[in-house]
Amino acid sequence: MSVKGALGFVLVMMSASTANAGDWRYCLATSQTDHKIYISAPFSVTSEPDDFESRFDGVLVRMHLRHDDVQCPHSNDEASAVADKQHTIEFNRRSGNQITDLHWTPGD
């Protein structure tokens, strides 16, 4: 491979990883009545925008877990998503809520 070809390949790979690095999420739903929170694993959004809230809600409904609104906050990278999820867990524990980590991602 020529130097020019190798540089082009590196630039393509860098732009692809930069695009994926900008959209990380995790989903959560509270059950104020039951003092619980259901939370997913952080996941990278690699495709067109999707209705992650609806998909996570569907999982909770199929599991017969009573819950309030679902939200899937956006983070710029994996480390931020993990930190945001941990902050959410700690806040809810201090508030007296039971945490249920479902280990769900959109591919499940």
Image (cartoon, helix red, strand yellow):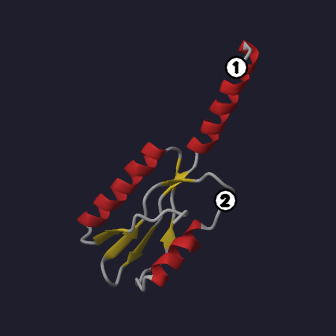
Residue 19's quadrant in the figure? Answer: top right
Residue type beneath disc 2: Pro
Q: Position of residue 36 (x, y in %)?
A: 32, 75
* Residue at disc 2, secondary structure: loop
Q: Position of residue 29 (x, y in %)?
A: 43, 72
Q: Is residue 6 above or below residue 83?
A: above
* Residue at disc 1, secondary structure: helix
Label 1 neighbourhood size at 10 Å, few (<14), some (14-19), many (20+)?
A: few
At horizontal 34% and vertical 54% (from top left) the residue drawn is 86
Sequence-wise, the earlier of marks 1 and 2 is: 1
Residue type beneath disc 1: Leu
Q: Is residue 96 above or below residue 61?
A: above
Label 2 neighbourhood size at 10 Å, few (<14), some (14-19), many (20+)?
A: few
At horizontal 39% and vertical 56% (from top left) the residue drawn is 85
Residue 12's quadrant in the figure? Answer: top right
From the image, which quarter does the N terminus lie in?
top right
Residue that badge 2 annotates: 49
Rounded to the nearest angstrom, the CA distance separating label 1 from label 2 is 30 Å
Residue that badge 1 annotates: 7
Q: Is residue 43 above or below residue 102?
A: above
Q: Residue furthest top?
A: 3
At horizontal 24% and vertical 64% (from top left) the residue drawn is 94
Q: Residue 30: which disc? A: none
Q: Position of residue 67 (x, y in %)?
A: 42, 81
